[in-house]
Structure formats: structure tokens, C-alpha cells
Amino acid sequence: MQSSLHIKNLQLFRHNELLLSLNEQVNGGEILTLMGPSGSGKSSLLNWLTGSLPSGFHADGEVWLNDSNITFTPAHQRHVGVLYQDALLFSHLSVAGNIAFAMPPGNKKQRLEKIDAALEQVGLKGLADRHPDNLSGGQQARVALLRVLLSEPKAILLDEPFSKLDSQLREDTRQLVFEQIRYHKLPAIMVTHDHSDAEAAVGKIITLSKLA
Amino acid sequence: MTNIQNKNSIDKAVIPKSKGKNNSQSGSQLNHSTDWFTRMVKFSPKFLLLLLIVPVFGGLIGVLLPAFGWAPALSQYDFGFQGFNALWQTSGFGQMIGLSIATGLVSTLLAFVVTLMILAAFFNSVWLDRIQQILSPILVIPHAAAAIAVGFLIAPSGMISRLFSPWLSGWELAPNGIFPHDPYGISIILGLTLKELPFLLLMALGALAQPELGKKLRSQHKVALNLGYCPMTAFFKVILPSLYPLLRLPLLAVLAYASSSVEMPLILGPNTPPTLAVAIMQWFNDVDLNLRIKASAGALLQLALTGGLLALWLLGEKLVKCLFCESLTNGRREYGGAYWQTITGVVTVSVIVFIGLALLGLVFWSIAGFWRFPTALPDSFTLLHWQSAAMQVGEPLFNTLFIGIITTLIAISLTLLCLESEQIKGKLLSRFTSLIIYIPLLVPSIAFLFGLVWIQQLLAVQVSFISYINVIIAHLLFVLPYVFLSLASSYRQLDSRFAIVAASLGTKPCKVFLKVKLPQLFAPILIAAALGLAISFGQYLPTLLAGGGRITTITTEAITLANGASRRTSAVYALMQMLLPLIGFILAWVLPKFIYKTAHR
């Protein structure tokens, strides 16, 4: 069965003022890109999708993930992974600890092997026991990516994930993230300011305008 | 503490900013060194150290010597262990120690666990703010008043038993009960837990309110939710490891206080035997002066006991860390969160209802005329108790206000000067200084205060004017740490560019301090002042001992009356104890709305 993330007839309001309306389906491996100025409701859309819409906002419409309605599912039961512009790694855990934190419980040895394999795959071999604050920005971004992927999400949201990286690093990281999304056949929604991000995603691009 | 300060220094980049300021003023450096204000500011941290170290360490030496038999005031000059021998032979000695350890440890643990449960269950929810608003006034209530209120509530004829009688319990007359004064210290634990819970919660929320740290932790909590963690698990696995270091000092202060305080155990505790701290106090105040050798030995033991408990806590910390380190990353997301959420809700509501009933009971007693047992409301109301209290309250009230205001003024001025010295020198106070500021909170006051009394008697000053000074110095030891804690972060966050602009316009350093910085800090200074007053108003032991028993305040009167005959008079005094600090906080909240309105818009 192909996985999909389906936003049905969404209308997002801030203080009863319509911010955006959207009706889209994203299939596994596809990346839907949302562009638009600040205040156009991009972040609120992501908050709604993760189940953490702040007070002051409300939404009509439904979100379906693989044929189940998750509109009212609490944030922690949605299986929607998010990559933010900051890596937001836990500073009380090592690199491996950060990834293990995200993985489903299971046999300790197998989990460790899986972490080592994943680190090697993204070129971070041998950094498992390092403290995340001692990594470079690009390395942190890759750990954050592994953390999301190994949590086995059913969809992934990208909140300007590359905006804090400089250009060469940005391209490499972007390529890695997109490859992984396609490899795992995850439906993805990306919010960005950057046109090169949008082009690299090779998917549908929606430009939101500021209504208010 | 150093943790918090290091955080601050990084977050607000105090150091680079102040350095910048220094550079910009380097031209007038020569001028500075001769400026009296700058010299005073630079000297202030040393004065602060002197003010704290001399009484505390002097006091400790003052109990150390008599404990080993050297007491010139009693004409005893033989070093030996007679004090300790007398101590071991006290009947119920083991029970005393056990009671001190149990009440201190259990109440601190309980308050900590409930704090964590509330934080975990309501993290990032509007309820956390509401709970904080409901509980924070409790902070203002002095321990003695809280103890009186709790005592009334759980007494056999108290509010709880009235609410369940006679329809459920069948009691037509007040039953015989063990509460308060139960031999197991349950009443003490209850009182201490209820009083320390809001303090710990507020400390935790204060740490989370630091802009950088708070934002980081909230987004990490969100990440954990996205990764499928139930909110409570996310708190324990993600927030707590980063939050705990900031809670360590308040926790240790709570533990030190709980294991050595006298106010709560005096009012809620058993008397056969009492806790160690209460026993020490009774020996000291005994007419038989030779008991003072035993009391000094007891004070040393109290020091060891509290020190041991603090060490035990730190050891427990390590143990917990070892035990749970693995499970942080085992990937388990759910530990019955919904179940714990419900339990936390029930506990929180019970705590709030319990406190509400206790306060209501207090108000009722203070205005009750005739009040038969099972009725929940007094049969008649009267203002007689308030009127008769008002006739006698003159001197205690004057003493309370006089000592409180002088102490707070000194504490605020000294704190401000020390914080200004940080900015002038361009670096934070040394670790040593910051540690010493909190020493009075970690050393059991009963240990060093008695030493102070000994020293005073050695100096043989018996003028009443002197006892005021003694009391003020003793109060300062406890007021200073809180005033400092409350002012430091606002002072360090102050935008230093205002001062630079003022200086570049040719303003003298003392004018910059008085006319530029202080007005900007008007609101935080008032809050710190209200806090200082509240702490001073609530002091029992320092007033009693340093004042040689000659200075009465509302608090000493309330405690003397608490175990006396009249519940009604006692209720009136407990309420007065609460009203005074409350007025202070209301003023601190209202005044900035009218004065220096523009300064903090």
C-alpha cells in the first residue's frame, strides 16, 4: 500500500481571520513545498499537522495519514516526524543517545548496531559517543535527520530545515534528506523561503500569499 | 548556584557588554579611581562577605567551644565530652534524631515529587500558570502561620473532621485524635511539604522562564512529542535532566531547613520527645544554665545531621542518575501517562483544597464566637478577638516593622552595590562570594545562632538598643540570600547601553546608578523588598535568640500563643502574620503602576 498524507478542506484561522485554505494529497516519496512570506500561516500549518496549534488559532478540515483520520489525535500519537531549522538535539544525551531516544524500544544490542550503521551511512562513523554540542552545524543536522528517520515516522515535515546552513553544506544536506525521504517512501511537506530548496524538491510548489 | 550564574552570563552576555562599557569609559578611568562612589561599590562585595562570614562562622565557633566544655560564661574551662555524654543519655534521644531525619527527608522528597508531577503533567499547558498563581501566595505565608493553619485543620475538632461529622463519622463530640503533635511527625511532614511545594515549583518555573533555556527546553519537549513520547515521559526524559541542576540549590536549602527548623515542629510536632532542633532550643532556654553545654553539643550534632542529609541527597542524586541513565534512551514512550496524569490532577486539587480549607478555618476561628463541634460554620461571629489583639499588638507590631524595614533596606542597598560592582569590574562575583551568600540557607540556623548568643554574652552587652542591632544582623543573614536571588537576574539583564549613553553625556557613576539604573529596576527592587520584608517578618529563632528574648514580634507572639489556650487569639496572630507580607507584595505590585510608569513599559 502506498503511504499518503491527505489534507482535506483545511481552513486555518487566526482570531477568526482566515489565514489559508488548502486541499492537498502528498504520496509517499513526494515532497510538497510551501512558500510564502512570514505571517502567511506556514508555521501554523505545520503546528496544526503536528497537533500543537497554539491558542488563538483554530482550524476546520481534516488530516488523514494512510487512511486514518488523525485530526484529533494527540501530538505524540501521530507518527509525524518534524525537522526544524535548529537541530534541537538533547544536550544531556550523546549522539547515539539522541538517536536511541527516538527509536522504538527493543533489543539493546540490535539498536546500537542500527545506530552505528545509520551513522556510517551519513558519514558520521565513530561519532556515536560524542556530545552533540561539539558537532558542526552540518553534523548536527545529519544527527537530527537520523533521529527523525529511525523513529519510523509515517510522514515527515520540514520546517525551513536548511536555512541555518551555509550554501555548500546546504546543498549536501538537502540532497541527503531528500534521498532518505524518497528511499523510505515518506510523504513530506516542506516549508521554505528558499527557491533552490523548492526546485531541488522536484514536487508541487504552493505559494501562499499574506491574506491578512 | 554557580550553575545559574554561569547560565546567566552566557545567556545575556553580561561580560562582553560590561567589558565594552569599560572600554568606552577608559578615558575617564583616572577619574573613577578617586570617585568615592566607585570605591564604595568596589568594596561592597568584601563588606557583604564580612557581614555573612563573621556571624555564621563566629557563631559556629561559638557552639564548638562550649560543646567541648569550654564556657567562660558558666565558669567552665575544662575541655571534655560531658556535653556529648549528657546528650547520649537523654531519654528518647534516638527517637529525636529519627524524627528530625524523617521529617526533613520525607517532606523534602514529597514536595519535590509533587513539584515534578505537576510540572510534568502540566508542562506547556495553561494550567501550569494557573496553579502557579494559586500557589504562589503560599510562599508569603510565614512557616509559623502555615503551621497554625494546618494544625487547626487536622485537629480532632478541626475543619476536616467537622466536614465529615456527624453524617459520615458519626462523631457528635470531637474525638480523641493524634493530630497534630502525633509522635510520628506526620503533621510536621504535612506542614513542611505544603509550605515547600510552592517554593520549589516557583523556583522551577523561574528557571524555565530564563529566555534561552526555557525556549530550548520547550522546543525539545515538542521534538519528543513529535517522536511519539507521551507528554509526561517527555518531561522526565528530556526536561528534567537539564532542569535539575538549577533546582539543586533550592532543594538543598529546603532539606537543610526542614531538618533543622523549629517553627513547624514546635507547633505541629510531638513533645515527648520533640525533634532535635526543638530539644536544643528548650535546653538553651532552660533555667538550668548547665544544660547549655548539652545544647551546644546538640547544635553540633544538628550540624552533622543536616550535613549528613545533604550528603545523602547528593548521593541519592548520583544513584538515581546511574539507575535511570539507561532508560533515558531505551525508547520506551509510555509509562501509564494517562494514569499518572489523573493522579497528579487529584493530588494538585487536594493540595489546593487542603490549603484553602486551612486558611478558611483560620479566618473562621479568628472571628468565631460560639462554635459547637460538628458544625462547619461558627454559630456566631464576633470581632472581639481582633479588638483585644489590637490592644496588645502595638509593641510587637512596631518591632516587626522596624526590624523588617531596616533589615530590608540594608539588604537591598548592599545587594545593589554588589551587583553594580559586577558591572564596574566587568565580571561576575567570584564563585566563593556567590557560595557564601547562600551559606545561611544551608547551615542549620540553630547551630550558629546559639554561638552568636554565647558570643554576645561573652561581650556582656546588655543594652536593649544593642539587641535590636543583634536581631537585625541575624535577620540579614536570611534576608540577604533571598533579596540577592530575586534581584540578581533583573540587574544582570539590564541593558548596559543606557548607562553607557548616560556616561558619555558626562554623568557621574553614582548618578548613573541612582538616576538611570535604579529607576529601570524599580519594579524588581520593590518585589525584592517585599520578599525581604516577608522573610524578616517570619523569622522566629533569630529574633528570639539574638534579641535575648526581650524583643517580641508578631511571629514570636504567634508561636508563643500557638500552643496556648486560645485558638481564637492564635488565629488572629497567624492571620496578622500573613497580612503583613501580603500588604508588602500588594504594594510592590501596585506602586510601579503609578511611579516611574515609563521606566518599565
Image (tube, grey):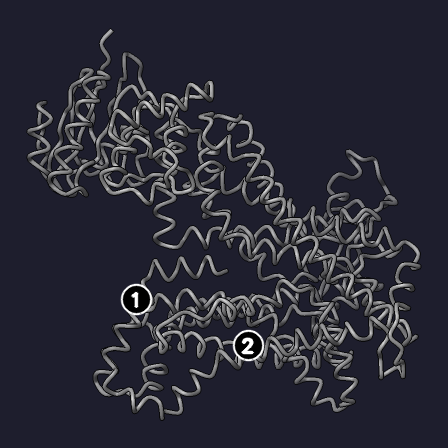
Which of the image's four quarters has the C terminus of chain B? bottom left
Q: Nearer the viewer, mark 1 or mark 2?
A: 2
Residue annotated with mark 2: B49
* Relative horizontal placement of residue B532, taking residue B25 as reference (left or right): right
Assess disc 2: are there few (<14), some (14-19) or many (≥20) residues with their C-alpha within 10 Å of its C-alpha: some
Residue annotated with mark 1: B601
Residue type at the position of mark 2: Leu
Q: Residue at x 75, y 84 (%)?
A: B456
Q: Residue A69: percent from the left, percent from the top?
A: 31, 17
Q: Residue at x 26, y 24 (%)?
A: A121
Q: Residue furthest front?
A: A126
Of residues B322 and B461, the one drawn nearer to the viewer in this rendering: B322
Q: Are marks 1 and 2 on the same chain?
A: yes
Q: Describe the element under mark 1 as helix, strand or loop.
A: loop
Chain containing the residue with disc 2: B
Q: Earlier in the sequence, mark 1 or mark 2?
A: 2
Of residues A5 and B229, the one drawn nearer to the viewer in this rendering: B229
Q: Residue A88: percent from the left, percent from the top?
A: 32, 40
Chain containing the residue with disc 1: B
Q: Residue at x 75, y 82 (%)?
A: B455
Of residues A4 and B445, the one drawn nearer to the viewer in this rendering: B445
Say which quarter of the image contains residue B535. bottom right
Residue type at the position of mark 1: Arg
Rounded to the nearest whole Å, what is the CA distance between mark 1 and mark 2?
A: 36 Å
**Please, is residue B557 above or below residue A107 in the view?**
below
